[in-house]
Amino acid sequence: MDPRQLDSGASHASPPHAVTPNAGTQGVAHRLPYLSVEEERDLALRCRAGDRMAEARLVLSHLRMVVKLARVYRRYGASLQDLMQEGTIGLIQAIRKFDPQRDNRLSTYAMWWIRAAMQEHVVRSWSLVRLGKSAAHRALFFSLRKLDQADAAAEPQPESPLAKLMEKGRLPAAEIMAMLRRLSAPDLSLDAPPPGSATAGPEREETFGERLATPLPSPEEMVADTRLQGLWTGLLAKALKLLPDREAHIIRARHLGDSAPTFEAIGRELGISKDRVRQLEQRALAKLRAALGPALLTHGLPGR
């Protein structure tokens, strides 16, 4: 069980300023003396009583363990400084949860908290897309990273390390294979060209983003649509001039405006009934279809 799950509020712990890891932490950590059982117990009791100086003393005396584990997890690509920062936070969480009345040394208890903090940081910073949020996902990440490249790239065969991992894994085989595919290659920027291709000059290749399909029209299609819209607008304007003023007004109001007023509203404006407005609209539309039909065929325009 991940010890960090024991107290959700512990995730907000931050190291006291005096023990914040910096460039000289590694040297300082190895020069600090070990604590005796009695000293450790006394400091832990004072810490539980709210003594922040006792807490800082416990942190400083166990920093060498943070440095040691940070060097181990550095192989996964995280920076040593970040690992030490996360490990120190885990150490503080362990100190605040440690019960000195039990027959355990703080170093044994804190190691699990420090390791969990560093593992979570490695998994969280490995990819821009989250690999998983549970302890089982973190354990799977480190198990897959330990596999040889040949074992990870091949299909799981009986008795192979990958097959054994899938047998005893706490996650479905589909999730295991999905994470394996994620770990097989690093994240790639959409603004970057394919690896090994030219980045400038006439031989420059398209970036990954430029190769993605887009729902937007191409520049050529936009030019063609603009010309088509202009031609259609011109033909419609000529056809409207053939209509009587009342019919042209009704068509513009009902079909060419931002919002279509009701027949009743137009009737009040023109001083006629709404049924008469409806009749005039139907007659005007019939005239427009008759006037625009030959033009649509001549110019190859779609019917609208």
Image (cartoon, rainbow, N blue to C red):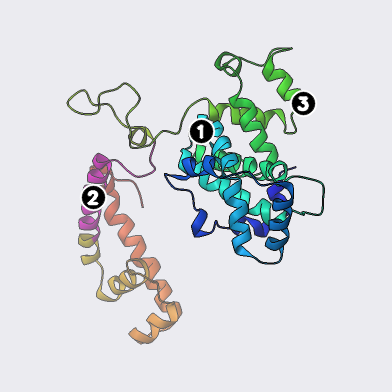
Q: Amino acid at mark 3?
A: Lys
Corner quadrant of residue 2 = top right
66, above or below 240, in the image: above
Q: Amino acid at mark 1?
A: Arg
Sort mark 3 into few (<14), some (14-19) or many (20+) by Cα contacts within 10 Å. few
Q: Position of residue 186 (x, y in %)?
A: 46, 30
Q: Nearer the viewer, mark 3 or mark 1?
A: 1
Q: Which quadrant is the N terminus positioned in?
A: top right
Q: Secondary structure at mark 1?
A: helix
Q: CA distance from mark 3 to mark 2?
A: 62 Å
**Which of the two labelled residues, at mark 3 and mark 1, occupies the earlier sequence position?**
1
The kind of secondary structure the magenta stretch mainly shows is helix
- How many labels sit on residues? 3
Residue segment shown in magenta: 213-236
Sort mark 2 into few (<14), some (14-19) or many (20+) by Cα contacts within 10 Å. few
Residue 189 relative to residue 160: left or right? left
Mark 3 lies on residue: 168
Which residue: 35% across, 45% down? Answer: 216
39, above or below 255, in the image: above
Q: CA distance from mark 1 to mark 2?
A: 58 Å
Between residue 198 and residue 159, name the one nearer to us.
159
